[in-house]
């Protein structure tokens, strides 16, 4: 396609960001603040903060099916409907299965949210920093090697946390570093008792209230964003009109827009990154308009690919040229390899007798977390890697009172009062190891609705994951027993990889171009003006919720990119 000078100039920006989710929003904010004219390409529709949250204030009876999904919708979307956050009030934020088919060589549940803001409208909002152990222990145990350490990213965690707004305690734990926190949420009476008993019994185990991206006490920077205090409604997945939790829509994208440097182009399905053989660099991004299916090209000096892990892999694999016949930057053949996820299969339940005269108010947006205590200072378990745990105690009045007959105010009061014992649940969030065989690749023989190759997912569990799950079940059952719980039971929910929605890897960072795709600044080793800072960049998976690490890596890489541009190195 030939463009004259004026036409090409209209399509040219200082920077292009592919994707508008958690990491893409941060790339846009940081680049725009530094004065770069930035184009954000989003394959989904436009979603504006507040005005495009149509169900945010609805009651169940306001919805046609009382917030239930129809059998027809479930049948048409067997993957998406497995997600805990998908119901009648949130379905408009989830991508239907048919919109981007893929090939499951091994079972993998790929949850997608194609709109401006992406999955930042739907994330679970739990935010734990990595510790030095997550950066150092993979090399110690021989399954990965990070090109950076905790000291490199710590200032960027702080940078992100102050803007996002993270509630939490300063707990002083080596395995879960403290951050820049707003006032914490509180454990209820049973959770406090269980936590105290675990701490008293196990010196290396310290349950804490969860750290989450909710404004418990908004600061000046949050008020400048137009956000307000979290109302503890826990209707977050509908979009929060209060801005009580962090999303691209409520925070980073509006902040970027205030600079006057931001352009967002929704309905832009990225086909590939354009590589100029003569210049030896990427020059732009080729898209298909989602409505017209017409191809269009945009140009920039630097490109951030933040399409979410698997789509970032897909885009780079499809970005072929004479120089890179197997995908952009893929000289070593490792693009799409070493994909990992988080292991949630272990579950333990129990009841707790006592405190039956007490209850709680509101819907707290976090749980109690138990930072990793396995394989920390040395390899001390039968499996490699780590896991953290989370638990909560609750009482549900309808379980015991819903069948009561009656009418009037007194009857309503009686069925709303809790009765019976407290129920306790404990789950795991386990690190899976990056393995060569866990990969994605293109299927050029089967195309999606836009004529692009479909993605093949070949990602599964291994024996190490099962050993880890069994260890968690053993340890969790023992902890709950020592904490005074009764009727302890456990199970393996056998969920598919992907349903954790924490997929990572495929475009991994590393020290050696022979074994990685990105350097310590998230640049492609062999195409320096292309950066990848979403989950695809992760060298290993850690055990913490990953989103805050994606955000910190993005801010760090954007700062580096701007400095390199000013030096005329990019």
Image (tube, rainbow, N blue to C red):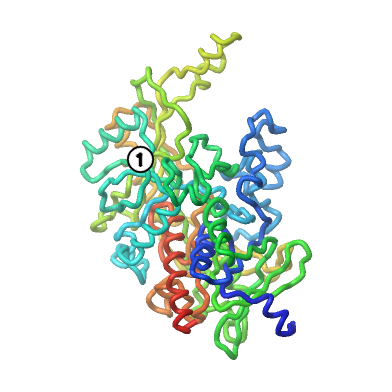
Relative to residue 69, is residue 233 drawn left or right?
left
Viewer-closest of 263 and 113: 263
* Residue at 46%, 65% in the rendered image: 554
Q: Which of 96 and 19 is in front in this view?
A: 19
Could you tell me residue 567's position as x and y percent? 44, 82
**Left or right of 33: which side holds 481?**
left
Q: Looking at the image, is 121 positioned above or below residue 520? A: above
Q: Mark 1 points at which residue?
A: 209
Q: Position of residue 16 (x, y in %)?
A: 58, 71
Name above or below for residue 284 compared with residue 182.
Answer: below
Q: Where is residue 536 in the image (x, y as percent from the top left)?
A: 50, 65
In this rendering, position of residue 275 left or right of residue 287:
left
Residue at 34%, 32% in the rendered image: 191
Is residue 89 depicted above or below 421 in this figure? below
Position above or below: 556 against 47:
below
Q: Residue 50, image x and y in percent?
A: 62, 45
The one of 91 and 76 positioned closer to us in this rendering: 91
Q: Label 1's element?
A: strand
Please indicate, yes or no, whether residue 499 appears anywhere in the rendered image.
Answer: yes
Q: Choose between 482 and 323: the one closer to the eye.
A: 323
**Residue neighbourhood size for the residue with mark 1, other residues' Cα within 10 Å, grouped as few (<14), some (14–19), many (≥20):** many
């Amino acid at each position: 396609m030939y463009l004259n000078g004026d036409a090409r100039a209209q399509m040219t920006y200082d920077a292009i960001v592919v994707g508008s989710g958690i990491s893409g929003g941060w790339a846009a904010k940081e680049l725009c603040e530094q004065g770069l004219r930035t184009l954000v390409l989003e394959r989904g529709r436009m979603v504006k903060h507040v005005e495009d949250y149509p169900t945010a204030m609805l009651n169940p009876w306001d919805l046609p099916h009382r917030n239930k999904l129809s059998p027809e919708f479930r049948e048409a979307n067997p993957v998406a409907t497995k997600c805990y956050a998908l119901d009648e009030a949130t379905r408009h934020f989830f991508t239907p299965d048919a919109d981007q088919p893929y090939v499951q060589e091994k079972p993998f549940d790929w949850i997608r949210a194609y709109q401006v803001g992406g999955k930042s409208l739907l994330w679970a909002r739990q935010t734990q920093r990595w510790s030095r152990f997550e950066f150092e222990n993979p090399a110690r145990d021989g399954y990965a090697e990070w090109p950076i350490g905790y000291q490199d990213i710590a200032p960027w965690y702080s940078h992100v946390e102050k803007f996002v707004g993270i509630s939490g305690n300063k707990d002083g734990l080596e395995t879960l570093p403290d951050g820049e926190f707003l006032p914490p949420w509180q454990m209820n009476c049973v959770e406090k008792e269980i936590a105290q008993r675990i701490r008293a019994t196990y010196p290396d185990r310290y349950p804490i209230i969860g750290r989450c991206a909710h404004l418990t006490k908004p600061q000046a920077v949050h008020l400048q964003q137009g956000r307000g205090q979290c109302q503890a409604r826990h209707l977050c997945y509908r979009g929060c009109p209060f801005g009580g939790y962090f999303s691209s829509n409520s925070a980073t994208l509006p902040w970027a827009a205030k600079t006057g440097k931001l352009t967002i182009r929704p309905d832009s399905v990225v086909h590939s990154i354009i590589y100029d053989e003569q210049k030896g660099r990427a020059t732009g991004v080729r898209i298909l308009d989602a409505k017209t299916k017409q191809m269009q090209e945009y140009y920039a000096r630097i490109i951030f690919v933040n399409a979410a892990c698997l789509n970032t892999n897909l885009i780079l694999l499809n970005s072929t040229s004479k120089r890179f016949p197997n995908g952009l930057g893929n000289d070593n053949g490792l693009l799409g390899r070493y994909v990992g996820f988080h292991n949630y299969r272990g579950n333990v339940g129990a009841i707790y007798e006592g405190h039956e005269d007490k209850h709680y108010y509101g819907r707290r947006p976090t749980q109690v977390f138990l930072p990793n205590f396995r394989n920390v200072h040395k390899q001390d378990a039968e499996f490699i890697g780590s896991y953290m745990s989370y638990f909560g105690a609750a009482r549900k009045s309808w379980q015991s009172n819903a069948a009561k007959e009656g009418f009037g105010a007194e009857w309503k009061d009686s069925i709303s009062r809790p009765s019976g014992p407290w129920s306790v649940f404990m789950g795991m969030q386990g690190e899976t190891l990056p393995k060569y065989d866990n990969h994605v690749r293109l299927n050029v023989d089967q195309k999606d609705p836009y004529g692009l190759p479909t993605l093949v997912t070949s990602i599964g569990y291994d024996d190490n994951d099962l050993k880890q799950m069994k260890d968690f079940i053993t340890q969790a059952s023992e902890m709950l027993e020592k904490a005074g719980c009764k009727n302890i039971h456990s199970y393996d929910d056998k969920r598919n990889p992907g349903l954790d929605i924490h997929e990572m890897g495929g475009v991994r960072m590393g020290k050696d171009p022979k074994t990685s795709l990105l350097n310590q600044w998230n640049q492609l080793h062999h195409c320096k003006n292309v950066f990848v800072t979403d989950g695809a960049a992760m060298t290993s998976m850690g055990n913490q919720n990953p989103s805050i690490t994606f955000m910190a890596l993005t801010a760090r890489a954007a700062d580096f990119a701007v400095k390199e541009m000013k030096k005329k190195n990019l």
